[in-house]
Amino acid sequence: MRIVNKIIFWVKNILFPDSCAICGCSFISDTEIQYGFCEKCKANISPVQGQECSICGKPLISEKDICLSCRNGAGHSYDRLWTLFPYTGIFRKLLTAYKFRKKVAIADFFTDKILAAIAANPVLQSAVIVPVPPRPGKIKDNGWDQVDYLVRRIIKNKQSRVKISFCLKRMKSKVQKSLNRTERLENLKGRIYLHGAYSKASTAPETVLIIDDVITTGSTMEVCAFVLKDAGVKNVYGLCLFYD
């Protein structure tokens, strides 16, 4: 089987050449093809280590336990948030390649990191994964949604034993990019709702892990968490690949 896979790799590489999504170098192994970027770049991409805020998950600089933003904020509907990478430098290139250039192979790398984070946190191991819902028509218009695709790759991963629900839906709203946190919260208010099996409190799971790609103001995560808590979910956690 290993020989067959290598033959397939070399035939694919010759007929359909590809290159690293980050540095542009040519691939030299089937592993590089699998993840969409070279081993050299992969060696420079690892989750942030060190102290992090016990609420929002962002790295702490001079604070202790809780960052200044969470300490001075109005509170969160989610119980805890984890973030893996900063949205800067090589990490920004990685997400740009995946999200905007549709280098979908990178989803398998993200999948590995998400499953590792779940395995490292006992409170997440029984959680039902719920992706942040895309705006209406996005998948139809663009052919995909980066978070939706990522979660579906998690489903197909042979090492995955997690439960997944696409129970959150989103109605039309203004584009969030130019809005501040308060405006984003107001913009999304009442526009994210439960759909399907978990729409009744009697069927709500005890623990949910919301998955998103980037957290900026945290407004989308907050609204999703509020909806789930309001439906009877006891523990709501969040995991974002990148923090901005």
Image (tube, grey):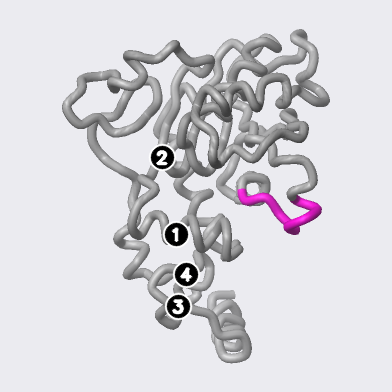
Sequence order check: which comes first, mark 1 or mark 3?
A: 3
Quarter-of-image position of residue 104: bottom right
Q: Amino acid at mark 4?
A: Ala
Q: Amino acid at mark 2?
A: Tyr
Tell me the distance, in whole angstroms, between the alpha carbons under discs 2 and 3: 31 Å
Sequence order check: which comes first, mark 3 or mark 4?
A: 4
Q: Secondary structure at mark 1?
A: helix
Is 52 positioned to the left or the right of 204 in the image? left
The residue beneath circle 3 is: 29
For the residues carrying marks 3 and 4, which lies nearer the camera in this image? 4
Seen from the viewer's position, the closer of residues 102 and 32 is 102
Q: Which residues are magenta?
A: 139-146
Please give the name of the residue rendered at 80% of the width and 25% of the height, measured from the top-left corner.
195
Q: Are marks 1 and 4 in contact (CB under 8 Å)?
A: yes
Which dot marks residue 94? 1
Q: Secondary structure at mark 4?
A: loop
Locate residue 68, reporting x and y percent.
Answer: 28, 20
Locate residue 79, reporting x and y percent.
Answer: 47, 16
Tell me the distance, in whole angstroms, between the alpha carbons under discs 3 and 4: 15 Å
Please give the name of the residue rendered at 20% of the width and 22% of the height, measured from the top-left corner.
63
Tell me the distance, in whole angstroms, between the alpha carbons under discs 1 and 3: 19 Å
Up the image or down, 108 lies above or below 116; here it is below
Sequence order check: which comes first, mark 1 or mark 4?
A: 4
* Residue 243 visible (yes or no): yes
Q: Secondary structure at mark 3?
A: loop
The residue beneath circle 2 is: 243
